[in-house]
Image (cartoon, grey):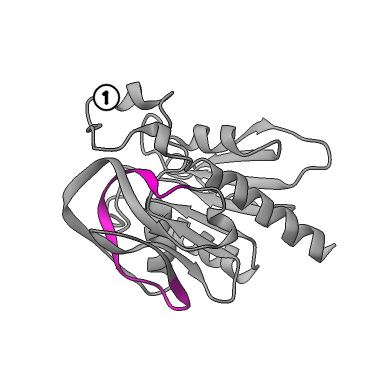
Amino acid sequence: MYIKLGTEPGGIVILVVDNAVEGGYMAGEVARLLPGEDVRMYNYPNGDDDPSLEDVDGVVIGGSGAGVYDEPDQPWITRQKKFVEAVIDEEIPLLGICFGHQLVNEVLGGTVVNSGESRNYLVEASLAEIPLFEGVRNVVPVLHSDIVTEPGEGMEVVGTADYNRYFATRHHERPIWTVQYHPEFTPEIRPEYSDSWDESEYSFEASTATRTLENFSQCCQQRTSVSD
């Protein structure tokens, strides 16, 4: 089922894929932080079909409490992998966040494993100087235990953390970017995760991770303008 969260006349259309198996998993925050676009949200775990890509100018694959290797118990993951393949084939700009980062890389032949450690705090990352990270400081929020240990074919590293060499990736030819961190995680929603969130040496005042979503929107806009 689609949920339409906002319309900007003449704006681009961005589809946010919600992967919350139950409850919420911040996809609504992703949609809220996308600046003034026509945003559509589709929940995969509770959907019976695949969302349409007609008129879609960009796709964001959100996080999930599931792992990309949970396919036997979560058949929606198999459907979503085929959907991601379609997005890639049509060269629609694609941003993968956390689970989305892992899923996109696995679809392209990469490897994802459980690291054995849950990380739910602000971390320091080294981010490349690319448009997606313009204005993004090196302190970003993470909530995960799974990590990419081998990137997908064509994916190059654009971000690292001290515990993960493949913290952020992009495709060397296609408009595909993925990040392990959650750009949508802000102090406003932190109370919802108080049971699992751990304090670190960093503060949210040092983080501008939400700029990632603004920058992705601009990348979609620029690509649409060129194609027009």
6 over 155 or under it: above or below:
above
**Camera-side residue of 137 and 1:** 137
| Callout 1 amino acid | Ser
Q: Is residue 149 magenta?
A: yes
**Camera-side residue of 126 and 62:** 126
Element type where label 1 sits in the image = loop
Residue drawn at the location 54% of the way across and 76% of the way down: 172
Label 1: which residue?
A: 194
Q: Is residue 155 visible?
A: yes
**Image-quadrant location for residue 10:** top right
Q: Main secondary structure of the magenta part?
A: strand
Q: Position of residue 63 (x, y in %)?
A: 40, 45
Q: Quadrant of the C terminus?
A: bottom right
Residue drawn at the location 70% of the way across and 39% of the way down: 37
User: From which residue to which does the magenta span run?
Assistant: 137-156
Using a 10 Å C-alpha cutoff, classify the residue at mark 1 as few (fewer than 14 neighbours), some (14 to 19) or many (20 or more).
few
Q: Is residue 219 magenta?
A: no
Q: Position of residue 221 (x, y in %)?
A: 73, 53
Q: Is residue 1 visible?
A: no
